[in-house]
Amino acid sequence: MPQKVKADQKNIIDCFIQTQGFYLMGPIYNPSGFKAPFTIDALTVLSNPGRAAIIGQVLGEFVKALDVDLILGIPNGGVPLATIISQYSGIPFGYIRTEKCQRTGELIQGEYAGKTKAVLVDDIIGRGNTKDKVLANLSGKLKIKDLIVLLHGGIGYQKMIEDWEIKSGVKVNYLARWDEITDELIKAGRLPLAVGEIMMEYLKSPEAFQSNAAYWQKFDEFKNSHSYQTIDPII
Amino acid sequence: MNDNNELKNKIFAEIAKVPDFPKIYPSWVSVGPVPIRLNTRRLYSYPKIVELFVEYLAPMIAESKVNLIAGAETAGIPLAMALSLKTRIPFIYVRKEEKIKGNVSQGCIEGDFKAGDKAVLVDDLLGNGKTKLLLIENLKKAGVEVKSIVMIMTTKNKLLAGFKDMIEQRHISLFKIYTWDELTSFQIDQGIIPKEIAPLVLDYMQNPDSWNDNARKWQSYCQALKNLNIEIPDFLKKYAAES
């Protein structure tokens, strides 16, 4: 079962809801293969050094309690977060390519000689497709028991994430869920109501949303009444 | 800005503790075979070294008067993020190519920025400068002006002079912690690079291009490696047979 990292939740939620450029106009196909009406850019949260420091402190403490000797970021989204966690925990950092470097044949960038247990770090988890590639490439070189992400893809991904945990043997640890953040953004009046309503429906079940004509019509109405282009920030 | 030699020596002393750095074993990299390899990215695994890099570079960033720290995909991202934490200047990173999701371009920049921002571009090292020029252009397309470039190390490359001219014309400042020559001299003094290969390594540092397909130099190097009982990699075996 994916687990939320213990932290002052208000502080964490504030990091996300105060971030400019966090919610973006869609539609866009996310890495899980679903067409989403709107999307998010988790990295913008780390653009702000004050918020990056808050997240670094929380995850730095969290990772110290794990039995690991290497923090491995998944490029590109996981690399800044893995750097911060390393800086705050003092645990060595590296990053892992999804494909071997064609020139040097290297897979892991960083010092991994003598290291046996690593924690994987990425910005977000949906179905876990990218992580599958990374784990396949590692093929037992390092023992991976935990994954840390900024964001859980939302309640609609819960079952998929649970299934991925069972299949991979890797526990998912996250700071916040996409639907929780969306809900807080609506409550704070930061997200247009129509966007909030559409996204809460999408995040309940991205799969079912694909053929939900009523909600796609609402999306079209929103798009037609605003000047946003795809990937323009909404907040 | 004058070099902070005391801090640089501290950095070299920490790097000296890193095992197999440099790797004496010849490697094949983007420019072809190189006699020794400094994989600067390995240094990111040592939080103490990253801390010293940041301590060294932070004043240079302050001098650049920028409001963004842009990491170069991918090797510049860790250093840029660490510098952002130290200087409290916002962080972004810049890709070599646009990110395409479905049929939608998401541009080359990730993170919070706006047109008119001024950035320092951060990377691990400077080879021939081609990638830096591409990244500067990608930032420019998004309306972000690069005021300076900071990196851990610069190498000698015949194309670098041309790159420096282009950078000067654009009024972009270049800052680095050390040159490969400086680190190599330190490593020879400390016995980290064996004296048997030191003259050849120094020759390579000074004239890397003169090693291109230079059978005599590679034969001498292979002989020195044999004397040190270092295995000759396949791509140099033709020279080893003749040495």
Image: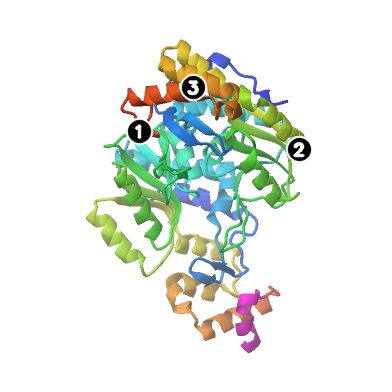
Residue B2 appears in the figure: no
Residue indicated by mark 3: A215
The amino acid type, in three-letter code, at marker 2 is Lys
Residue A211 appears in the figure: yes
The amino acid type, in three-letter code, at marker 1 is Gln
Q: Nearer the viewer, residue B26 or B112?
A: B112
Residue B104: quarter of image: top left
Whole-number angstrom distance, CA of label 1 to CA of label 2 = 38 Å
Q: Secondary structure at mark 2?
A: helix
Q: Nearer the viewer, residue B133 or A164?
A: A164
Q: The magenta stretch spans which residues? A: B232-243
Q: Secondary structure at mark 1?
A: loop
Disc with the residue nearer the chain's start (3 vs 2): 2
Residue B59: quarter of image: top left
Is the residue A8 above or below the residue B226 in the image? above
Residues indicated by labels 1 and 2 sit on the same polypeptide chain: yes
Q: Alpha-carbon neighbours of circle 1 within 10 Å: few (<14), some, or many (≥20)?
A: few
Which chain letter matches label 3?
Answer: A
Is the residue A153 above or below the residue B48 in the image? above
Kindly give the residue lying farthest to the front in the view shown: A213
Q: Percent position (x, y) of residue B147?
A: 29, 45
Residue indicated by mark 1: A229
The amino acid type, in three-letter code, at marker 3 is Tyr
Q: Residue at x 38, y 29 (%)?
A: A233
Which chain letter matches label 2?
Answer: A
Q: Are marks 3 and 2 in contact (CB under 8 Å)?
A: no
Residues indicated by labels 3 and 2 sit on the same polypeptide chain: yes
Q: Secondary structure at mark 3?
A: helix
Q: Alpha-carbon neighbours of circle 2 within 10 Å: few (<14), some, or many (≥20)?
A: few
Q: Residue at x 49, y 38 (%)?
A: B82
Residue indicated by mark 2: A167
Disc with the residue nearer the chain's start (1 vs 2): 2
